[in-house]
Amino acid sequence: MSNVTDESLRLLVEMARLKSVPRLGWLLRGVRDVESVAAHSFGVAFTAMLIGDLARGRGMAVDLERVLRMALLHDLTEARMGDLPRTIKPYFEPGALRRAAERAAGEMLPPLGPLGAEWYAIWMEYEERQTLEARLVKAADKLDLLLQAGEYEKGGAGDLGEFWVGAEEDLARLGLGELTADLLSALRAARPANTESARTGKGE
């Protein structure tokens, strides 16, 4: 086999690990049978495709192929670093986790040659959040998180209201307006009525 084929197979094997890497934040909140990083990436890709098509329907110029590539690549470094929950971030110097992720991506993708360089650029584009496509994928990442939180609440996980805190502000900063605001409102409305935050507003 050629070197490119060898490296392609290596990356495929590495990415397959994401099917068994758990989303650790859910485990830390006592949720059992949690989704994998790969399952989350699928949710992000599908949500991003939906938002992208809705944006196109409103006359926005969206590179949907780039959106889907970005959604599939956005968590690739977790194949090496694992899923690091936000509770771990205060224990690291500012920027340390970002630098570690850049190093991991910089080791994983360049061996593919020009293709790897292209994919690395897409991954970095997501990290920098400067383009419409990157902001769209970040919105999809947030919305998929909230969708999953709601599903776990419906399944009896209890109040996961902390994941909803500041959601409006987080999405508003991405500048996508009603595209995401309406979906967030619908997700909130679908939350179980018996959660503490749904009853009192606490934690939101």
Image: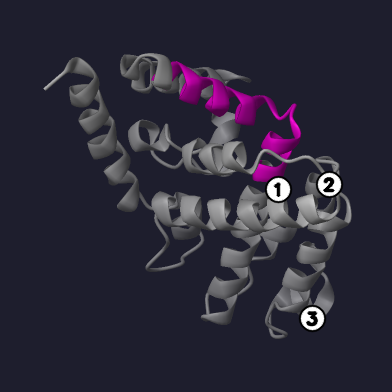
The correct choice, above or below, for 96 with respect to 91 in the image is above
SS type, badge 1: helix
The answer to which of marks 3 and 1 sits earlier in the sequence is 1
User: Along the horizontal axis of the image, is 59 left or right of 109?
Assistant: right
User: Along the horizontal axis of the image, is 149 left or right of 104?
Assistant: right
How is the rendered protein coloured? one colour
Q: Residue furthest left?
A: 1
User: Along the horizontal axis of the image, is 186 left or right of 6?
Assistant: right
Cα gap from disc 3 to disc 1, whole angstroms: 26 Å
SS type, badge 2: loop
The image quadrant of residue 154 is bottom right
Q: Which residue is mark 2?
A: 176
Q: Bounds of the magenta span?
A: 116-137
Q: Which residue is mark 1?
A: 139
**Residue 81 belongs to magenta span:** no
Q: Which residue is mark 3?
A: 199
Q: Residue furthest bottom?
A: 194
Amino acid found under the numbered disc labelled 2: Leu
